[in-house]
Amino acid sequence: GTCAAGRHNQSIACNDCQDGLRDSGNGTCEECGGGDYAFFITVCFIIPIGVTCLYIGLKKETQRQSGSGSLMMTCSLQLLLVTVQMLSVMRRFDINWKEPFASVLVFLEFLSFDLEMLSVSCVTSMGPVALFGLRSLVIPVLMFAILVVHLCFLLCTRSKTFQGSNLWRTMGTTFLVFFIVLFSMLLAPFQCH
């Protein structure tokens, strides 16, 4: 049989794009541009910087006195994160959303671990199982990055204690941020379309 333009005819159900092409969203594949590579590299640099900033921010918050303003800000941010996660899950439904809501859902797509948004197929070719495995490993990789940041902080400050509370708080916050999206993504293969 034949596949849509740019699809690899040896892949299962024409799922994979040919080398150097990425999914265009309409069933075909298009050529990777310079912006695809730049976006992928930028995200690879932002993740360690974001983990480090989160760790330092939470460490500084534990050092200063918590007041009612800090509690209110924390609760507000948690509510915002839960709302953003729910919106990114709603993007998975095949509904024709109207503007400006459709644009907001597209903007929040990066929170749903959609690796095709990063144009991973421009960097390497992966089958659906490998892509699902990579998506599933995002949280463990983030947890490992937090551990590395924590150990680097302990080495730089020459701390004699492990200071596990800072590590656990940062890991817990990260898991909280990605909780809803993580489980919706893990259950995605079991959804019928």
Image (cartoon, rainbow, N blue to C red):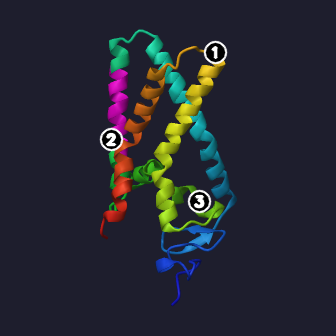
Q: Nearer the viewer, mark 3 or mark 1?
A: 1
Residue in the picture at 59% in, 64% down: 121
Q: Nearer the viewer, mark 2 or mark 1?
A: 1
Q: Is residue 108 visible?
A: yes
Q: Which residues are magenta?
A: 72-85
Compared to 192, does 168 lie above or below? above
Q: Magenta part mainly helix, strand or loop?
A: helix
Q: Label 2 near label 3: C-beta < 8 Å?
A: no
Compared to 112, does 57 lie above or below? above
Circle 3 Cα neighbour tier, 10 Å, few/some/many (<14 / 14–19 / ≥20): some
User: Does residue 92 appear left or right of residue 21 in this picture?
Assistant: left
Instruction: Identify the element where label 1 is drawn.
Output: loop
Instruction: Identify the element where label 3 is drawn.
Output: helix
From the top left corner, tell me how far across and down residue 14 is, in percent.
50, 78
Toward the bottom, the furthest residue is: 1
Q: Residue 83, labelled with which disc?
A: 2
Residue in the picture at 37% in, 30% down: 77
Report the residue marked by disc 1: 158
Q: Between marks 3 and 1, how big is the CA–CA gap?
A: 39 Å
From the top left corner, tell me how far across and down residue 174 is, in percent.
44, 36
Give the camera-side residue of 55 and 150. Answer: 150
Residue 62 falls in which quadrant of the image?
top left
Toward the right, the furthest residue is: 34
Compared to 13, does 35 lie above or below? above
Q: Nearer the viewer, mark 3 or mark 2?
A: 3
Q: Between marks 2 and 1, how big is the CA–CA gap?
A: 40 Å
Q: Label 1 near label 2: C-beta < 8 Å?
A: no
Identify residue type, mark 1: Arg
Identify residue type, mark 3: Val
Report the residue marked by disc 3: 120
Compared to 7, does 109 lie above or below? above
